[in-house]
Amino acid sequence: MIFYLKRHELNVTKYNTCIQQSVNTRIYAYSWYLDVVADCWDVLVLNDYEAVMPLPWRKKVFLKYIYPPAWTQQLGVFSKLEIETSLLKEFIAKIPKKFVKVTVQFNSGNEVDFLPVTKLENYVLELKKSTEELTNKFNTNRKRVLSKGIKLGYKIDKSVAASEFLKFYQLEHSYSVTPNNMSVLKKIITTLDNNVNIWGIRKEHKLIAGLVWLKDDNRLTYLLPEATHFAKKQGLPTLLIFELINDYSESNLILDFEGSMLPGVSNFYKSFGALKEAYSYVSFFKIWNSII
């Protein structure tokens, strides 16, 4: 049976264990992460936490709706066993009627083709092989850029302060970010959780490239890169990614680039030998437990 539990009713240990052991686990679904990024969130739970579906929600005027929080690419249903279509339908049917609209970016392990869906692209790279084998899968241009970056001799600072990165990001970011999303970002990178990492490269002690990445037991998530025009010309974003690959090669981890629908960005990720992984964006109004 599927139960609806409010956040304060949740058995956090059982919930996080379910996320950790899921075949389609994502760091975004852990309780600590949702506590940071979501305005509010509740959960649908199958039996004794055999499968779960977190429900981030917020309220506008008197209407409650489920939404994808900032800095959270994929949620949906998580389970230790392969998720059947019938189970997905059961979970969606159990979303309470009080949520008038439901918008979810379902993880790649959820096939929701029974609903109108928009397919989005992610790119992932398995890190099981050696650094040399992984680097050999880079395309010709990426190898050239990496070689240039290495020869320049830049050092990577693996303990950049959150405050320094935030100032750098706000200064260099080329498009506007809402105050709410900036506030959420600040909460993520200032959390005491050791799953959050901030790396950077400096020129004359000044940050010119930075990367926020997340680590759990299964994935390295390439959450937020930023670089000056000069740093991009020097190939420093490539150097940061290579360092991640080098540090975690010959492991069972996956480097999750978080993908992009922008051709230039997706081609950049593919140039590292990353493979495309589709996930689903679904949005519908829920009236009397029906989908329209």
Image: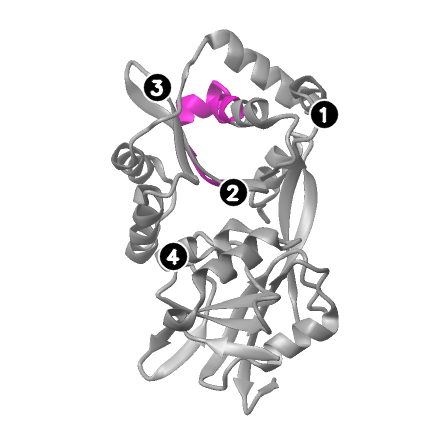
Given this view, does label 2 or label 4 mark the residue nearer the observer? 2
Residue 105 in picture, x, y percent from top left: 56, 62
Tag 3 secondary structure: strand
Q: Which mark is residue 202?
A: 3
236 in magenta: yes
Q: Which residue is mark 4?
A: 37
Q: Which residue is mark 1?
A: 137
- Which quarter of the figure is the C terminus placed in? bottom right
N-term mark: 1 or 4: 4
Whether residue 85 sits left or right of residue 47 in the image: it is right
Residue 155 in picture, x, y percent from top left: 41, 14
Identify which amino acid the numbered label 1 is placed on. Lys
Whether residue 170 sits left or right of residue 230 in the image: it is left
Mark 2–mark 4 distance (CA, rounded to whole Å)? 17 Å
Crowd around label 3: few <14 · some 14–19 · many ≥20 (10 Å): some
Q: Which residue is mark 2?
A: 216
Tag 1 secondary structure: loop
Pointers 3 and 4 in contact (C-beta within 8 Å): no
Given this view, does label 1 or label 4 mark the residue nearer the observer? 4
Tag 2 secondary structure: loop
Mark 1–mark 3 distance (CA, rounded to whole Å)? 28 Å
Crowd around label 1: few <14 · some 14–19 · many ≥20 (10 Å): some
Q: From which residue to which does the magenta span run?
A: 221-240
